[in-house]
Image: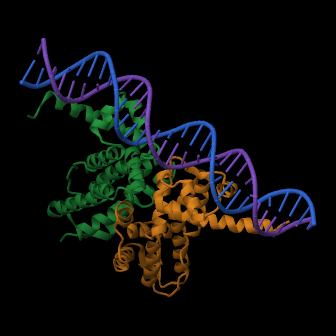
Chain colours: A orange, B green, C purple, D blue
DNA sequence: CAGGTCCGGTAATGTACCGTACCATCTCTT
DNA sequence: AAGAGATGGTACGGTACATTACCGGACCTG
């Protein structure tokens, strides 16, 4: 009953539609995107779109939940014994991802529609900032077991590190056309890492 | 030529329209607010609204610029000699304001419409996060002249303090129905202040 | 008081758009 | 090979909405 030819094709088509719709929604936002806009890009008929997604709102929830889930993973990092390089690598990866075009676009859409789709945007929060913080806290815990220094209160440390990492930058990117260069990102990350090292680390004896 | 009776009345009416329109836009967002919705609340005719504001977009820019300007002031604070109470007072005021219903609503609208009104939302950034940071840096400078302790690099210290203050909270409020209680806010502020004191302060000799 | 300007209310105009219906064609299952 | 379902293309219904137009009455200025 599984691996039906029809079903396989349908699933493929669904993925394709979802991918293109994601692009369109990210480019124009929820309200400014019309179903016809999406259709123009995917090329099929209206009926097929409505078969896969019962309406515009369903399309929105599918886009946001799947994207926010896929986009929220810390890259596996080299686990050297030194803390600072680890922080730099993790921080840079996090910021680069957070400030990327797609993530910013999704954030704009999710924040705007939060009052209308509370359950959906809650998922964004959980897959996004919350999960990032938890994963980082876990990495800190791992580090504490094998590393040279000790990180106090990993959960709160992770929270603080990510916050200083974001600083002002994310707001600025969300609200203006500003996009920092990789060099500027690196500089911000280095500053945040140094703060972190001053505060949350005690040398292991 | 000034203080005309007509002009006075008109200015008054404009203010009234702007205030009510602000409420409606904040409650429903830009795209979901219809001109008729606003009109229903202000009670007049369409023509008068269109006389004061040439269209929906003009109404949007007026709302966002004036509100973001008015909402972004640090309260004057008691300048005692101790740093910690100062941080607590400033931080609490900042967070309470940032997480208030209206500010959150404006942020949602501004972020969503940023691609379409770049100049306007840029003003929001400058009146909001940027200005807050500058004002706080100035306060730190003042403190350094009269206080008991010394804050290193006031500009960057202000940035870091506000960032740790926000932490995760603002995202969570933007994306979910969560609203922290005053007690929780106080707790967050205290944590951020303690973190700050550990990092950015050197005792004056 | 005369005249211009603002105001309120309603109607009209034109457009954009979501969702459905119809029908011929293609694809996979049995 | 036949039937069932998916697809493409186009057209339709109904609605919501921004903006303009019209008109009778109110208010301020000269």
Q: Percent x, y for residue A188? A: 35, 75
The answer to whether A5 appears left or right of B166 in the picture is right
Residue drawn at point x = 53 percent, y = 65 percent: A23
Quadrant where the C terminus of chain B sits is bottom left
Front residue of this view, candidates A72 and D14: D14
Is B75 or A89 nearer to us in this picture?
A: A89
- The quarter in which the N terminus of chain B is drawn is top left
| Quarter-of-image position of residue A121 | bottom right
Identify the image quadrant of residue A3: bottom right
Residue A64 visible, this orientation = no
Residue at (66% x, 52% y) in the render: A54
Q: Position of residue A102 (x, y in %)?
A: 49, 67
Residue A45, relative to residue B16: is it above or below?
below
Relative horizontal placement of residue A31, taking residue B95 as reference (left or right): right
- Count of picture labels: 0
Relative image position of residue B182 (x, y in whole percent): 41, 46
Left or right of A57 in this view: C4: left
The location of residue B89, given as percent across then percent down, is 30, 51
Q: Is residue B9 above or below residue A48?
A: above
Q: Is residue B146 visible?
A: yes
Residue sitting nearer the eye, B94 or A203: B94
Report whether A200 appears left or right of A10: left
Question: Could you say which quadrant of the image residue B15 lies in?
Answer: top left
């Amino acid at each position: 009953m599984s691996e039906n030819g029809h079903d396989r094709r349908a699933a493929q088509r669904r993925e394709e539609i979802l991918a293109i719709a994601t692009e369109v929604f990210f480019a124009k936002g929820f309200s400014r995107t019309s179903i016809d806009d999406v259709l123009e890009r995917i090329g099929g008929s209206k009926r097929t779109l409505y078969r896969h997604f019962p309406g515009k709102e369903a399309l929105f929830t599918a886009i946001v939940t799947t994207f926010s889930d896929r986009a929220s993973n810390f890259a596996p990092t080299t686990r050297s014994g030194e803390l600072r390089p680890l922080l730099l690598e993790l921080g840079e990866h996090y910021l680069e991802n957070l400030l990327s075009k797609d993530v910013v676009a999704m954030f704009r859409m999710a924040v705007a529609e939060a009052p209308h789709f509370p359950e959906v945007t809650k998922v964004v929060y959980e897959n996004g900032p919350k999960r990032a913080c938890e994963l980082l806290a876990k990495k800190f815990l791992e580090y504490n077991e094998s590393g040279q220094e000790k990180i106090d209160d990993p959960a709160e440390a992770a929270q603080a590190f990510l916050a200083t990492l974001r600083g002002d930058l994310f707001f600025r990117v969300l609200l203006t056309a500003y996009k920092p260069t990789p060099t500027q990102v690196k500089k911000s990350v280095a500053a945040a890492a140094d703060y972190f090292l001053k505060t949350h680390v005690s040398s292991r004896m």
